[in-house]
Amino acid sequence: MSQDRWVLLRRVESYDIAAMAAVVKEGFELLGRKPQGKVLIKPNVVMANKNYSQFAFTHPDLVGTVVDHVRTFPGVADLNIGESGGFALPTRMLFKESDYYAMGRRHHVPITDFNEDKYVKTTLARAKYHKTMLVPRLIHEADFKIWMPKLKYHICCEITNALKLNIGSLLHKERMLYHDDRLNDKIVDILEIGYPDIIITDAITIGHGFESCAKPFHLGVIMISNDPVASDVVAAQVLGYKPEQVNHLRIASERGYGSIEPDSVKVLGDVTIDELRQRTSGIVSQFQDMQKLDTPMRFYEGIGPNTQKICYGGCMAAVKGSLGTIDARRPGSLKNAKPGAIVTGIYEGDVDAGGGVCLLLGDCTEVKGAIKNARRVKRLKGCPLGAVKLTSMMPFLFGMPSPMLDTRDVPLTVINTIEKILNKVRRGAL
């Protein structure tokens, strides 16, 4: 951790190459350190779809601009871009849909799905839950790490910026471990491995709603910092939170990763936190509070068995993600859905299904009271429930259009999954 923790907030109104290059150059000069050896750039490419998800990922032109600047340092021996995208989706498909492969060809830089490459099993000395981690080779071998998040609101973790970006450091085979009522602790566990040297945040267009199918909001800023916790302290305030309200940020501070007091961070640049916070103050980020959704579906969130707190990152997070995808793909799907109830966790009280299906999700889910007005009660098992299984079943139960019947996306997923498997065989990464 740096003793001098700073965040640069610089106005950049569009993805103009010259404007972005000037800010990137300034950020590296402030850093006072030069990239050398093996350099890894990790962006956020959690989801991309040319039809309904074009604002969830770090803009490729900003990443390409950073690639070009890093190449100006003579000590750089190797440069790679790596990411593990959304669970159960082949990341190579997301690279194609977001034009990352095209950017890689323009800038002559390899783009790697961590899931297709080799990895090293590593013990995490400071972790609470994630005691070991299958660390992607590119992260394990990196001499200099550049994290490039996309600033967004998050459905269950308030914000996604530098710390939350580390979920994409996990291979899919470990992605859902502790992804339940322990998610915020898990995020901080991974910080031990994914501690970047510099953070360059795409906040030119930020995202709200379901972060993987984010709705755009023009903020017109690039954020650069030398400390991930400091970066998130400023990001939280920009999005209208006090730093201590962002749970993984509070946990990181409690574990010794640095103060989250606003005055512990030096803020530089030509725009203030207050100005940006005023601009975002009118945003209502859909899916953060399920009770505010415009839909006849009803949601009952119970506690998880591990912490005895609401299981915010488990099955209900999968519900939010599935519904967010369904509604982004076909706007109005939620409003026109059939009545019913979805229950997650151990719920104390009665559940009213409104004359429709009562869907119990997850292994631990239990209704302590009565289930009323249910045409049918159905349980889907899992801990947490897989998104593919949920998205396969839920649309049919509640009368919504199913992504699983998409004549464009389903073949793309199958083809890219096959390509992924073949590439893993070629790399010896099975």
Image (spheres, rainbow, N blue to C red):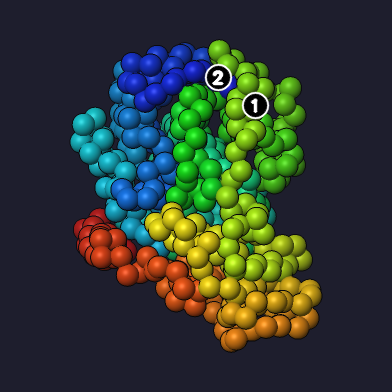
The answer to which image quadrant residue 249 occupies is top right
x then y, percent, for residue 309: 75, 62
x then y, percent, for residue 226: 55, 25
From this viewpoint, which residue is outermost toward the front? 336
Residue located at (65% from left, 77% from top): 353
x then y, percent, for residue 295: 58, 63
Q: Is residue 178 above or below residue 215?
A: below
Camera-side residue of 202 and 369: 369
Q: Tag 2's secondary structure?
A: strand
From this viewpoint, which residue is outermost toward the bottom? 376
The answer to which image quadrant residue 72 occupies is top left
Q: Tag 1's secondary structure?
A: helix
Which three-letter amino acid code belongs to the residue tagged 2?
Leu
Residue located at (29% from left, 52% from top): 92
Residue located at (78% from left, 81% from top): 369
Which residue carries the number 1 mark? 278
Q: Nearer the viewer, mark 1 or mark 2?
A: 1
Say whether disc 1 or disc 2 marks the residue closer to the N-terminus. Answer: 2
Which residue carries the number 2 mark? 8
How many numbered discs sit on the rendered protein? 2
**Residue 355 visible somewhere in the drawing:** yes
The answer to which image quadrant residue 257 occupies is top right
**Lateral position of residue 50 relative to residue 241, left or right:** left
